[in-house]
Image (spheres, coloured by chain):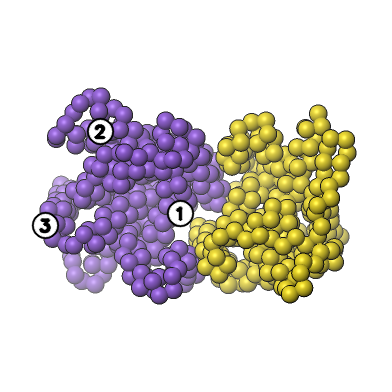
């Protein structure tokens, strides 16, 4: 009882913190920082959802952008083609947007189920290639669907995403990931990551655990795609190429595979990084971001393979340093 | 009918190039059980070193062409990529020899992207014309079937290199050591095989083959760019998996199948699905026959 109470308290604190962020902090900063802030929120959603698959379950997925594309196109199609026919206006638009986001997430979750299935037979490198292939196939298929714009991209999507949507989606996604930490499914995920055969022997249904991780990860990636679509009002298959997936992978590797708070910290850090590198870029006229990312990735793997926080959450370090009981 | 033969010839020469890259994937996988994602970038660097060496030879005196120059550029590019492959293994993969597989995988992806973006910075992101090293204008005609000299060059060079590899692997002592290491690291070590040397050698051979592939692609499709390695690398990887990864002869057969099927789908099927085909084949083969066409089933060790 006490334990549930405590975890609810921390969720409430997080909720209050996000209210402050959305309604007090965000309006008071200048537009330049606002745009960085929104990018950071988007990265948090992508990273924490990918943590479920890559970090908790140890299934190395490189197709996160593919799920994002499925959700983004689905939600955008709903608001562009269905909403005008319903004639909903005012607050009902937001309701419909929520429905569209969840619809995009669900379709993407179906995609996650389809990709999760082969993952039962594949592991490591093969799975990485298959998920990469899935992302590319989605992209090629979208390029060939003319009613969704094809290579021209889908434009004229209503701008519905604002800071409130992004902050609360990030909160919901992070809480979803955090809540897995203590549950049987979450522990099953960790067991699969450490040793699949041993997990199976201990009675973990590895199939169900892996598919669940993929489905939930894909759901949130789809929601992120929907938010992305309605943030910029334009979607193109090239937005969801391998680099997008790779961004999310770098974030979670840097934060520590398996640590949700590490993923959040790294998402914020890596959203700021391009801005910090901007003077260098102006000096040399070249965008160093990707070179920097890949170098960071290699150096971290060689010298600090566990990332910033390793497999622990921030609370572990707070307790270790005596800041929190 | 003659059109079909024409497409078959084109497909075989495409498949021969894939085979050169696929061999590198399959050799490294056979010995280290990991996919060297940076291999496709080694191929790209092979094309660029061919570009720079070829242009350096031609500097000032107008275009020189000839078999001698071609062979020199080919060998020099192979040597360059061999050195790069050696360094990649030494600096990025060797420190992780005992690390979990996922770390090696992430590093390999990192090395691959580092090369892609490094090349964009060093060589510029725009496509460059590859120097014409041999005279490619006279094509041979057999009835309605036309064979370009480049296709003959590609096939001859590719199959000569494959025969060379076959000789090294199955007729020399080093090849025997390579096969021993791929069978079991520890036992090979006990029997006095210098495992580190053999692993380095595997990277050197695989990278040299990829470098040769880069030069041949440069000649056959004379536009090179920093991201040119991605799709051929991907398709060669699929070819290696199709033939049973770790199986050298399987990789060659898989590459020919890839080259032909790609050619046929462009002509007889849906051209826009050309690049999705590789992934579709890959997913199909991984789901229905993960060991590939000629691979051996591996039992998972506990």
Helix, strand or loop at mark 3: helix
Residue at horizontal 62%, vertical 61%? Answer: B128
Q: Are marks 1 and 2 in contact (CB under 8 Å)?
A: no
Rate crowding at label 3 as few (under 14), some (14 to 19) or many (20 or more) other CA atoms within 10 Å.
few
Rendering quarter of residue A44: bottom left
Q: Looking at the image, is B115 positioned above or below residue B17?
A: below
Rate crowding at label 1 as few (under 14), some (14 to 19) or many (20 or more) other CA atoms within 10 Å.
some
The label on residue A99 is: 2
Residue A199 at x, y = what percent? Answer: 45, 47
Residue A324 at x, y = what percent? Answer: 18, 66
Toward the right, the furthest residue is: B142
Sooner in the amino-acid sequence: mark 1 or mark 3: 3
In the image: residue A65, left or right of residue B34:
left
Chain seen in yellow: B
Chain seen in purple: A
Q: CA distance from mark 3 to mark 2?
A: 27 Å
In the image: residue A17, left or right of residue A107:
left
**Quarter containing the N terminus of chain B:** top right
State the residue position of label 1. A243
Residue B264 at x, y = what percent? Answer: 69, 35
The label on residue A150 is: none
Chain letter of mark 3 equals A
């Amino acid at each position: 009882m006490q334990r549930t109470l405590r975890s609810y308290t921390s969720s409430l604190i997080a909720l209050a913190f996000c209210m402050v962020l959305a309604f007090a902090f965000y309006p008071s900063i200048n537009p330049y920082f606002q745009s960085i802030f929104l990018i950071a929120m988007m990265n948090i959603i992508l990273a924490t959802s990918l943590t479920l698959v890559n970090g908790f379950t140890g299934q190395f997925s490189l197709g996160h952008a593919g799920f994002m594309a499925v959700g983004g196109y689905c939600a955008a199609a709903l608001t562009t083609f269905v909403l005008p026919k319903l004639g909903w206006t005012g607050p009902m638009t937001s309701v419909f947007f929520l429905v569209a986001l969840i619809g995009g997430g669900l379709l993407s979750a179906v995609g996650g189920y389809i990709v999760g299935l082969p993952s039962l037979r594949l592991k490591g490198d093969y799975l990485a290639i298959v998920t990469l292939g899935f992302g590319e196939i989605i992209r090629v298929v979208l390029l060939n669907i003319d009613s969704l714009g094809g290579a021209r991209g889908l434009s004229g999507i209503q701008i519905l995403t604002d800071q409130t949507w992004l902050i609360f989606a990030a909160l919901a996604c992070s809480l979803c990931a955090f809540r897995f930490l203590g549950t049987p499914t979450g522990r099953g995920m960790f067991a699969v990551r450490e040793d699949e055969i041993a997990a199976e022997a201990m009675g973990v249904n590895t199939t169900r655990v892996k598919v669940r991780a993929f489905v939930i990860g894909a759901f949130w990636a789809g929601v992120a795609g929907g938010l992305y679509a309605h943030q910029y009002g334009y979607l193109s298959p090239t937005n969801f190429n391998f680099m997008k997936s790779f961004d999310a992978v770098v974030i979670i590797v840097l934060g520590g595979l398996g640590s949700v708070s590490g993923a959040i910290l790294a998402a914020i850090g890596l959203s700021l990084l391009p801005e910090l590198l901007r003077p260098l870029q102006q000096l040399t006229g070249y965008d160093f971001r990707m070179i920097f990312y890949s170098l960071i990735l290699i150096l971290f793997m060689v010298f600090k393979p566990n990332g910033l926080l390793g497999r622990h959450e921030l609370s572990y370090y707070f307790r270790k340093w005596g800041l929190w009981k | 009918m003659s059109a079909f033969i024409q497409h078959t010839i084109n497909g075989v020469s495409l498949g021969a190039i894939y085979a050169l890259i696929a061999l590198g994937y399959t050799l490294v996988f056979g010995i280290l059980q990991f996919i060297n994602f940076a291999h496709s970038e080694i191929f790209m660097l092979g094309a660029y070193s061919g570009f720079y060496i070829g242009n350096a030879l031609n500097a000032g005196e107008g275009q020189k062409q000839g078999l001698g120059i071609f062979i020199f550029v080919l060998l020099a590019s192979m040597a360059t990529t061999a050195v790069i492959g050696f360094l990649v293994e030494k600096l990025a993969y060797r420190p992780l020899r005992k690390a979990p597989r996922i770390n090696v995988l992430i590093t390999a992806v990192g090395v691959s992207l580092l090369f892609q973006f490094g090349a964009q910075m060093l060589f510029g992101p725009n496509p460059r014309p590859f120097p014409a090293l041999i005279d490619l204008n006279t094509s041979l005609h057999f009835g309605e079937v036309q064979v370009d000299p480049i296709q003959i060059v590609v096939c001859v060079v590719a199959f000569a290199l494959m025969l060379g590899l076959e000789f090294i692997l199955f007729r020399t002592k080093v090849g025997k050591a390579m096969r021993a290491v791929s069978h079991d690291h520890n036992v090979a070590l006990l029997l006095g095989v210098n495992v580190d040397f053999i692993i380095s050698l595997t990277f050197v051979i695989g990278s040299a083959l990829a470098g040769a592939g880069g030069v041949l692609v440069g000649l056959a499709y004379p536009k090179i760019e920093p991201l040119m390695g991605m799709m051929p690398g991907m398709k060669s990887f699929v070819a290696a998996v199709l033939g049973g990864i770790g199986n050298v002869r399987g990789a060659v057969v898989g590459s020919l199948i890839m080259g032909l099927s790609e050619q046929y789908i462009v002509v007889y099927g849906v051209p826009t699905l050309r690049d999705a085909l590789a992934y579709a084949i890959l997913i199909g083969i991984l789901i229905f026959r993960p060991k590939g066409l000629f691979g051996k089933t591996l039992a998972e060790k506990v």
